[in-house]
Amino acid sequence: MNLLFVCTGNTCRSPMAEGIFRNMIKNDDLLSNITVSSAGLMTNNGNYASKNAVEVCCEHGIDISSHSSRMLTADMLSVTDLFVCMTFGHAYDLMREDVPKNKIYVLEVSDPYGGDMDIYRQCYEEIEKKLVTLADLLRKHYGDEL
């Protein structure tokens, strides 16, 4: 399964979510084969993750320092099995590109861009909590298939 985290700039929320989820599933027998990546709807390719996003992930033992932003492409739309959007607005944008609703999961996480470390820490905790729920849903899905 190809899972793609989607936000606006691909420098804060989606790279944090990508790092958190990748770390969360790396030793999970049911989920370790999921391919995890991220992209932005309105970004330039090659931007670094925000300094605060890198630092807050580092506080949790997750290294996203080599992250490079990517613009969502038509190729990504065609190969992604599940789009995990940071907001309903991002999900709406994907549906306008004919992505089926059943391939979209929304976290609804506020954008920390420009915020201080406390804002990024709150964002990290919110993402992590919601990704635990997503991982549980995916385990149930994979468990039902076994």
Image (spheres, rainbow, N blue to C red):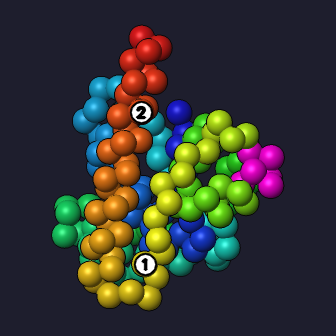
Which residue is located at x 28 percent, y 63 percent? 125
Where residue 141 appears, as percent x and y from the top left, is 46, 24
Q: Which residues are magenta?
A: 94-99
Vertical placement of 39 versus 78: above or below?
below
Amino acid found under the numbered disc labelled 2: Leu
Vertical placement of 30 versus 75: above or below?
above
The answer to whether the residues at label 2 and label 1 have Cβ atoms under 8 Å apart is no
Please indicate, yes or no, whether residue 54 appears anywhere in the rendered image.
Answer: no
Please indicate, yes or no, whether residue 101 appears anywhere in the rendered image.
Answer: yes
Which residue is located at x 56 percent, y 62 percent? 87
In this view of the protein, which residue sits in the foreground, 87 or 81? 87
Label 2, secondary structure: give it. Answer: helix
Q: Which residue is mark 2?
A: 137
Q: Which residue is mark 1?
A: 112
Where residue 33 appears, as percent x and y from the top left, is 41, 32
Where residue 54 appears, as percent x and y from the top left, is 33, 74
Residue 96 part of the magenta-drawn span: yes
Which residue is located at x 64 percent, y 76 percent? 44
Vertical placement of 97 versus 100: above or below?
below
**Left or right position of 130 against 42:** left
Separation of residues labelled 2 and 1 (CA atoms): 26 Å
Q: Which mark is residue 41?
A: none
Which residue is located at x 39 percent, y 24 percent? 140
**Sequence-first tag of 2 and 1:** 1
Where residue 21 appears, as percent x and y from the top left, is 36, 49
Quarter placement of the C terminus: top left
Amino acid found under the numbered disc labelled 1: Pro
Near mark 1 (Cα within 10 A), the count class, few <14, some 14-19 or many ≥20, is: many
